[in-house]
């Protein structure tokens, strides 16, 4: 399951945890083979931002628990207790400030973390690019009301005015030269920002998609879903990227779970109904109960949504199910892949389309 919907920090704020995030660099790596997928997915990494330090946590054999059930409030502490602290890194010291206060974190790569530095008095807010290996950082005076990863060295940050900046981070220096404390690398972190676009209104969630050009999908607090600066649809309660598709839930008169491939997003007006924003493509939408929200999804095409009464429902949208079937048949090297494909087609009632005269 993609654990992006888990919000442990919201339940543990009183324990000194400010924010938590899962690694963004996992999405840039190619998917592992089916033979190694179990071992790769069973290891879950988590980065916790506390009042004093950054904690790198890892846990094994939690993939089944994350995929089979949603994380309730009472389970947040139990989940974190299953993690082992692999490393504790003190928070960076921002030049020119005696003590910096951070509110968000973004895990770009194995050694690069982006922190949102809050405004304190006359000190402006900005982004801190922190190198975990050397302990060095670079401060960028740009507000970070919303963050999203673009690559292992780039990210987007949005100001309250809706202006989105593309930030490129570069770590230079001799990796073999040691200085200061033992284990600290002599490296320099540099960050440069350029204005990418300006959104019509402030959005609380950003997602970078490649079509293959770089575009932004953003969702405002009022449920407006934007593709770059164009309005895609309204009354959206959830919007997440799943594989090469954009999954979003429209909570309209007839709620729908919608899927749009990334290459079709620039031409969304040709594939969606202009009033509701529901795709007109075949197999691209599914009716839901009003008030349903997205919880997570799995590698086999499953999507878990939470209904208004609190119970969970697992659905298999056809586009995701067919994508998983294509992977099993053409990309897998497991000897029993044909039996797995036939069993998956039987369970999902996927049949060969026959042309009739």
Image (cartoon, rainbow, N blue to C red):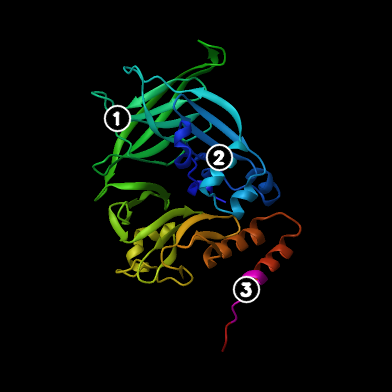
Could you tell me if residue 244 is visible in this image? no
Mark 3 sits on what residue?
349
Question: Magenta part of the protein: which range?
Answer: 346-354
Q: Nearer the viewer, mark 3 or mark 1?
A: 1
Q: Are marks 3 and 2 in contact (CB under 8 Å)?
A: no
Is 269 one of the magenta-colored residues? no
Q: Nearer the viewer, mark 3 or mark 2?
A: 2
- Residue 344 in the image, given as x and y percentages of width and height: 66, 66
Label 1: how many Cα within 10 Å (few below 14, some 14–19, many 20+): many
Residue located farthest toward the bottom when viewing the structure as drawn: 357
Q: Nearer the viewer, mark 1 or mark 2?
A: 2
Q: CA distance from mark 3 to mark 1?
A: 53 Å
Residue 175 or residue 316, whichever sits in front: 316
Above-or-below relation of 151 to 129: below
Question: How many labels sit on residues?
Answer: 3
- Residue 128 in the image, given as x and y percentages of width and height: 38, 28
Question: Residue 287 bears which disc, if any?
Answer: none
- Residue 122 in the image, given as x and y percentages of width and height: 23, 23
Q: Quadrant of the C terminus?
A: bottom right
Relative horizontal placement of residue 204, taking residue 310 as reference (left or right): left
Q: Are marks 1 and 2 in contact (CB under 8 Å)?
A: no
Residue at image position (42%, 42%) is 150
**Disc 3, SS:** loop
Question: Residue 125 bears which disc, if any?
Answer: 1
Disc nearer the start of the sequence (1/2): 2
Residue at image position (68%, 44%) is 39
Relative horizontal placement of residue 357, taking residue 330 as reference (left or right): left
Residue located farthest toward the right when viewing the structure as drawn: 335
Mark 2 sits on what residue?
77
Could you tell me if residue 124 is visible in this image? yes
Relative horizontal placement of residue 243, taking residue 147 as reference (left or right): right
Residue 97 found in image quarter: top left
């Amino acid at each position: 399951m993609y654990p992006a919907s888990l919000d442990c920090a919201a339940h543990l704020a009183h324990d000194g945890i400010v924010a938590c995030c899962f690694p963004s660099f996992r999405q840039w790596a190619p998917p592992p083979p089916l033979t190694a997928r179990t071992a790769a997915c069973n290891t879950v990494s988590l980065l916790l931002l506390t009042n004093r330090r950054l904690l790198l946590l890892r846990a094994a054999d939690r993939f089944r628990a994350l995929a089979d059930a949603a994380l309730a409030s009472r389970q947040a502490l139990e989940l974190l207790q299953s993690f082992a602290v692999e490393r504790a890194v003190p928070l960076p010291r921002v030049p020119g400030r005696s003590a910096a206060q951070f509110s968000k974190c973004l895990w770009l790569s194995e050694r690069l973390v982006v922190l949102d530095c809050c405004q304190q008095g006359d000190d402006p807010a900005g982004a801190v690019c922190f190198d975990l290996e050397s302990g060095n950082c670079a401060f960028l005076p740009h507000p970070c009301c919303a963050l999203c990863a673009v690559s292992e060295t780039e990210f987007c940050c949005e100001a309250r005015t809706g202006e989105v900046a593309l930030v490129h981070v570069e770590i230079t220096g001799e990796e073999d030269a040691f200085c200061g404390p033992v284990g600290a690398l002599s490296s320099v972190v540099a960050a440069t920002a350029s204005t990418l676009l300006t959104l019509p209104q402030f959005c609380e969630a950003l997602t970078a998609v490649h079509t293959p050009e770089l575009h932004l999908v953003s969702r405002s607090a009022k449920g407006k879903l934007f593709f770059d600066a164009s309005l895609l649809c309204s009354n959206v309660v959830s919007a997440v990227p799943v594989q090469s598709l954009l999954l979003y839930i429209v909570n309209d008169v007839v709620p729908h779970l919608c899927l749009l491939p990334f290459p079709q997003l620039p031409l969304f007006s040709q594939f969606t109904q202009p009033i509701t924003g529901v795709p007109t493509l075949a197999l691209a939408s599914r009716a839901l109960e009003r008030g349903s929200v997205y919880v997570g999804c799995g590698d086999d095409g499953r999507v878990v949504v939470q209904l208004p009464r609190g119970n969970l429902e697992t659905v298999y949208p056809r586009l995701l199910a067919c994508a998983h079937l294509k992977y099993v048949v053409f990309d897998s090297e497991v000897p029993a892949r044909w039996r797995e494909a036939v069993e998956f087609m039987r369970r999902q009632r996927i049949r060969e389309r026959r042309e009739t005269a």
